[in-house]
Image (spheres, rainbow, N blue to C red):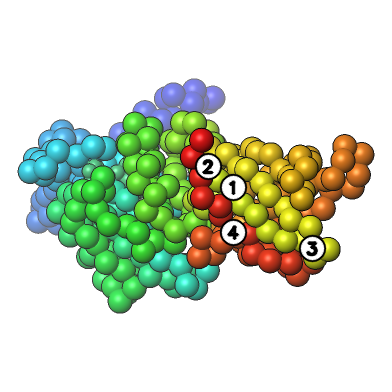
Amino acid sequence: MIFHPVCATIVQFEQAITRLTFVAEQHPLSVLLFTAVLFFSLCWVVEPYISGAPLFRDLSFDDYSAEEPPHTLLDVPFVPSDEKSVDAMLELAALGPKDVLYDLGSGDGRIVVAAAKDWDIRAVGVEMDPLRNEEAKEYAEWVKVSHLVSFVEDDLLSADFSEATVVTMYLLHSVNIELRPRLLNELKPGTRVISHAFDMGAWRADERLQFSGVNIYKWIIPAKVAGTWEWKRADGKVCRVELEQEFQRITGKAWLDGKEVFLTKTKLRGDELDLSISDCEDSYPISYPMRFVDNQLRARVPGEQATSAIRLPNKTT
Ligand SMILES: C[S@@+](CC[C@H](N)C(=O)[O-])C[C@H]1O[C@@H](n2cnc3c(N)ncnc32)[C@H](O)[C@@H]1O
């Protein structure tokens, strides 16, 4: 006789039920225990879905704040940077052993802790929400980097971050723009500023990373070099430049022994200024690699520049 596959399944099912009934009659207590375990396991799996309880760590942080909002009004909600972005931000910062990193709006402390753990540097988180700061401290303890990190409960718009050599932020465009003058005026030239997702408007980034739809921006705090500078060349001639500055962009004019010449290149990166000047239109320009130190422009390499450039007082005409 040829058996249809559906008939075979029905027969197997009937046999299984018969076997189960037999086991239930022989061992009624075991079956009761098995049913109870199955029931409670199901409840445990399904309960979070029906009660709305958080399934993930980050979600539970958000619920925490929603239930008990901070007394102060936050300028940016808590949205943590993902691990790939944190790694990319720290890589782009080009961290060295002497760096001190400040994360403005440090949330659960993940950037601060990663800087200490992966780069062995001192790092400070500035965060207004005390609950986040508690989370961050616990996390740092767990990762065993408490000796390298601190979390300050403060408003990032007014907190002192002037000791930083690297600043990281994941804020909003409007908050970046509000912070911009403080970053430019209070941080030392050469300090790196790294922002996740948001730029700084007219202050163009020096570098940018892009991956999976994410932008990471890097700025280098430019020295303030606008003004008139004068120095002596190795041949005794006097160079003078008048420089104008908009963030890291430099434009200007140059003179050699009082005669106007050509300023062919200007490049400012942190405290390093590179100028190139040629005597006449078709002559090869001479380069002046300088460093801004103590309000002077010192030659970075010995050569054509015999003296440091001194800033001349503004003309009052
Ligand atoms: C988008 S989260 C970024 C968290 C963390 N930096 C990261 O990238 O994972 C912004 C954080 O800034 C904090 N924040 C918002 N306004 C602030 C303010 N005025 N002062 C200090 N922290 C603030 C929020 O509580 C939140 O934790």
Q: Give the secondary structure at mark 1.
A: strand
Marked residue nearer the N-terminal end (3 or 2): 3
Can residue 7 be seen in the rendering of this structure? yes
- Measuring from the top left, give residue 259's x and y in whole percent: 78, 42
Residue carrying label 4 = 310
Cα separation, mark 4 vs mark 3, equals 16 Å
Real-space CA distance between mark 1 and mark 2, rounded to the nearest whole angstrom: 9 Å
Mark 1 vs mark 2: which is more N-terminal? Answer: 1
> Residue 78's quadrant in the figure?
top left
Q: Does 312 appear above or below 263?
A: below
Q: Which amino acid does label 4 sit on?
A: Ile
Label 1: few (<14), some or many (≥20) within 10 Å?
Answer: many
Give the residue number, with chain letter if any, for mark 2: 315
Q: Any atom of ligand 1 within 8 Å of the CB at mark 1?
A: no
Q: What residue does disc 1 label?
A: 228
Would you call the spot at circle 3 few (<14 residues within 10 Å), some (14-19), or many (20 or more)? few
In the image, 3 versus 215, the foreground residue is: 215
From the viewer's perspective, tell me whether residue 235 is left or right of residue 6: right
Answer with mark 4 or mark 2, whichever residue precedes in sequence.
4
Q: Residues within 10 Å of mark 4 (few under 14, many from 20)?
A: some
**Relative height, residue 272 to residue 256 (above, below):** below
Q: Which residue type carries mark 2?
A: Lys
The foreground one among 10 and 149 is 149
Q: Which label lies toward us, 4 or 3? A: 3
Tell which circle, 4 or 3, labels the residue nearer the N-terminal end: 3
Q: Relative to 238, is 131 on the left or the right?
A: left
